[in-house]
C-alpha cells in the first residue's frame, strides 16, 4: 500500500517551495501522485525530480549566478575588466574578500564562481537591500514562496491592472517598518518592485520612501528560483551587514582583497538625481573614503576602487587624480545605461584605482 505525504512535506524534504511541488505534480513529473480534493498527495518514497531549473552549484554551474536585483551603477558590463585587474593570489594567499558597498553584487557573484574564500564580508547602507541578501541567505524557501505568489498574481493582470497592483505593493512596502516578523515579506516586495519599476532604479525621497514609478514590462521574471537558490547556497559563509563602510576595518588584513564601489561623484549638477538612501555621499565623504583607503593600504590589504571620471565633463578636474595620487589609476570605458533621458546614455570613462 502506497504511503503519501503532502505537498508541504515534500517541499520541506526536497528543499523547494510548495508551489514548485504542485507544479511538478501537475506536469506529471512525479510518478503515482494522487489528489484529495484540491490537495496533491505524493508517495513518501518518491525522489525529487531532476529539474533543469534547479542546477546545483558545481564548479562548472556557478557561472549561472547573477545579481538578483537590478542596481544603478552595477558592474555587470565591466566584470571582465575588473577580473583582469584582480591582484595575484586570489583564492590562495588572498583568502578573504570584502565589498563595503555591495549594490547588486555583480563582482561578488563572479568571484564566487571561480574562487573559494575562507570568509566574505558584504555591506551596504541600504537596509532594504541588505535585508534581501540576509533573507535570501537564511529563509530562501519562504522568500521564493512569497515571490511565486506575487508573480502568479501579477501575470494574470493586464497592463493597466499591473500598474494599480504595483502602486498597491509600493504602498505596502513603504508602510512596513522592517522588523524580524516582516523581513521576508519586505524582501519579497523589494525584489518585486525592483523587477517591475521604471528602469530598475532604487530611489527614495527625503522621507526615505521608495518613489520610483512603475515600469512597463511584458514578462518580468519576478521569481528566478534557480538563481535565488544558487545564490542562497553561496551566501552561507558570508557576513552581511548594513552599516558604515569603515566597519570592514577589523575584517580586512594582509590576506584580504577589498573592492570599493561607492556612490559615484556626480559628473554634473543633474547626473546625481538618483538617491539610493536618504543620505547623500558628497565630496567630503569621498575624501574620507580616500583616507580610509590609504589606512587599509598601510595594513597591506589589497584594494581596488571604482568611481566616476571628472574628465568626462571637465578635463581640468583632477579631484580623484589628486585624492589618490601615488596609486595605480586607470581609465576604463563603460556605458551609462541608467539615465532619465535616453539621449544622455552612452560611453563614458570611469576610474579604477588599485594599490598593487
Image (cartoon, rainbow, N blue to C red):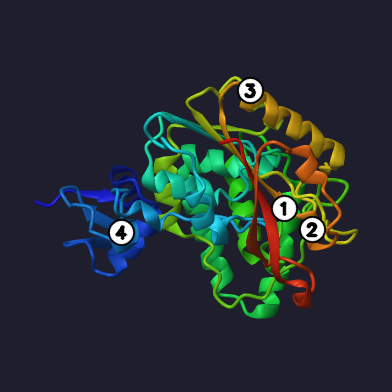
The residues tagged by marks 4 and 2 sit, at their Cα atoms, a distance apart of 63 Å
Q: Which badge, 2 or 3, is on the more N-terminal residue?
A: 3
Disc assigned to residue 172: 1
Q: Position of residue 36 (x, y in %)?
A: 29, 60
Residue 298 against residue 344 in the figure, above or below: above
The residue singled out by tag 3 in the image is 298
**Residue beneath the point at 39% across and 35% down:** 91
Disc assigned to residue 95: none
Disc assigned to residue 40: 4
Q: Position of residue 241 (x, y in %)?
A: 61, 32
The residues tagged by marks 1 and 4 sit, at their Cα atoms, a distance apart of 32 Å
Q: Nearer the viewer, mark 1 or mark 3?
A: 3
Q: Residues within 10 Å of mark 3 (few under 14, many from 20)?
A: few
Q: In the rendered image, which quarter is residue 323 located in?
A: top right
Q: Residues within 10 Å of mark 2 (few under 14, many from 20)?
A: some
Q: Is residue 37 visible?
A: no
Left or right, 18 with respect to 270, comes to left
The residues tagged by marks 2 and 1 sit, at their Cα atoms, a distance apart of 43 Å
Dot 1: element: helix
Looking at the figure, which quarter contains the C terminus? top right
Amino acid at each position: 500500500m502506497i504511503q503519501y505525504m503532502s505537498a508541504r512535506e515534500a517541499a520541506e524534504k526536497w528543499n523547494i517551495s510548495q508551489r514548485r511541488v504542485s507544479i511538478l505534480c501537475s506536469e506529471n513529473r512525479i510518478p503515482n501522485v494522487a489528489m484529495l480534493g484540491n490537495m496533491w498527495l505524493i508517495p513518501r518514497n518518491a525522489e525529487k525530480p531532476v529539474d533543469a531549473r534547479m542546477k546545483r552549484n558545481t564548479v562548472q554551474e556557478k557561472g549561472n549566478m547573477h545579481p538578483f536585483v537590478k542596481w544603478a551603477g552595477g558592474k555587470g558590463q565591466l566584470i571582465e575588466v575588473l577580473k583582469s585587474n584582480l591582484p595575484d593570489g586570489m583564492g590562495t594567499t588572498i583568502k578573504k574578500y570584502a565589498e563595503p558597498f555591495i549594490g547588486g553584487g555583480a563582482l561578488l557573484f563572479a568571484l564566487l564562481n571561480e574562487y573559494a574564500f575562507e570568509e566574505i564580508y558584504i555591506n551596504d547602507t541600504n537596509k532594504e537591500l541588505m535585508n534581501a541578501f540576509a533573507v535570501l541567505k537564511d529563509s530562501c524557501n519562504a522568500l521564493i514562496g512569497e515571490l511565486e505568489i506575487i508573480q502568479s498574481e501579477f501575470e494574470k493582470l493586464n497592463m493597466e491592472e499591473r500598474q494599480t497592483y504595483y502602486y498597491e505593493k509600493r504602498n505596502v512596502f513603504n508602510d512596513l517598518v522592517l522588523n524580524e516578523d516582516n523581513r521576508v515579506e519586505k524582501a519579497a516586495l523589494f525584489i518585486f518592485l525592483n523587477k517591475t519599476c521604471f528602469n530598475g532604479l532604487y530611489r527614495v525621497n527625503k522621507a526615505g520612501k521608495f518613489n520610483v514609478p512603475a515600469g512597463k514590462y511584458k514578462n518580468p521574471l519576478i521569481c528566478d528560483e534557480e538563481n535565488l537558490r544558487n545564490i542562497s547556497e553561496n551566501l552561507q559563509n558570508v557576513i552581511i551587514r548594513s552599516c558604515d563602510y569603515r566597519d570592514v576595518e577589523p575584517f580586512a588584513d594582509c590576506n584580504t582583497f577589498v573592492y570599493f564601489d561607492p556612490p559615484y561623484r556626480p559628473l554634473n549638477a543633474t547626473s546625481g538625481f538618483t538617491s539610493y538612501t536618504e543620505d547623500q555621499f558628497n565630496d567630503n565623504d569621498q575624501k574620507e573614503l580616500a583616507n580610509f583607503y590609504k589606512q587599509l593600504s598601510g595594513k597591506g590589504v589589497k584594494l581596488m576602487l571604482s568611481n566616476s571620471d571628472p574628465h568626462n565633463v571637465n578635463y581640468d578636474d583632477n579631484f580623484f587624480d589628486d585624492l589618490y595620487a601615488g596609486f595605480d589609476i586607470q581609465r576604463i570605458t563603460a556605458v551609462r545605461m541608467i539615465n532619465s533621458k535616453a539621449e544622455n546614455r552612452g560611453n563614458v570613462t570611469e576610474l579604477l584605482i588599485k594599490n598593487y
